[in-house]
Image: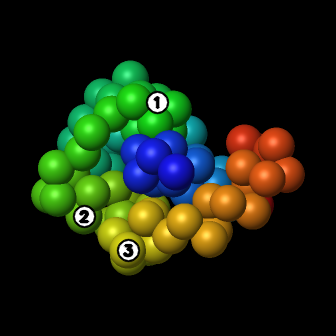
């Protein structure tokens, strides 16, 4: 599985669990909303520093964003939505 897709699925689930908008996460990261959208769609290739900033913005460890097992439960259910 593409690690960018894994990170995007996980980022979206963590964001939605916190009831945050993409804009709110972007502000916490010091980034643009379109950047967060690209992350969640799995098309943005993050640097390690941005990965850490995303984790901090969502209140999770950067490693949690890369957890394939967590993302796989979403992808196998066909649900890109909430927790």
Q: Secondary structure at mark 3?
A: helix
Residue in the foreground of this view, choosing between 69 and 8: 69
Residue in the image at 50% along x and 70% along y: 67
Q: How many marks?
A: 3
| Horizontal arrangement in the rendering, residue 83 relative to residue 21 (left or right) | right
Residue farthest along the right direction in this orientation? 77
Q: In 3D space, how far apart are the residues under numbered discs 3 and 2 (Cα atoms)?
A: 9 Å
**Rendering coords of residue 50 (x, y %):** 21, 52
The residue depicted at 72 percent of the width and 42 percent of the height is 80
The x, y position of residue 41, in whole percent, is: 51, 32
The foreground one among 57 and 12 is: 12
Q: Is residue 51 left or right of residue 20?
A: left
Distance from Cα at disc 3 to Cα at disc 1:
20 Å
The image quadrant of residue 33 is top left
Which residue is under mark 3?
A: 63
Mark 3 vs 1: CB contact within 8 A: no
Q: Secondary structure at mark 1?
A: helix
Instruction: Name the residue rendered at 54%, 65% in the picture.
Output: 68
Q: Quick check: can you spot residue 15?
A: no
Q: Which residue is mark 1?
A: 37
Say above or below: 64 vs 50: below
Circle 2 SS class: helix
Decide if residue 65 is on the left or right side of residue 18: left
Q: Residues within 10 Å of mark 2 (few under 14, many from 20)?
A: some
Label 1: few (<14), some or many (≥20) within 10 Å? some
Which of the 4 image quadrants contains residue 24?
top left
Give the class, few, some or many, for how many residues have Cα within 10 Å of label 3's Cα (few <14, many ≥20).
few
Pair 3/1: label in front = 3
Identify the residue under disc 2: 52
Quadrant where the C terminus lies? bottom right
């Amino acid at each position: 599985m593409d690690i960018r897709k894994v990170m995007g699925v996980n980022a979206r689930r963590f964001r939605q669990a916190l009831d945050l908008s993409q804009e709110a996460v972007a502000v916490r990261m010091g980034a643009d909303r379109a950047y967060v959208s690209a992350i969640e769609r799995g098309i943005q290739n993050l640097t390690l520093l941005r990965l850490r900033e995303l984790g901090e913005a969502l209140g999770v460890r950067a490693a949690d964003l890369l957890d394939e097992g967590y993302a796989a439960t979403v992808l196998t259910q066909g649900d890109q939505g909430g927790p």
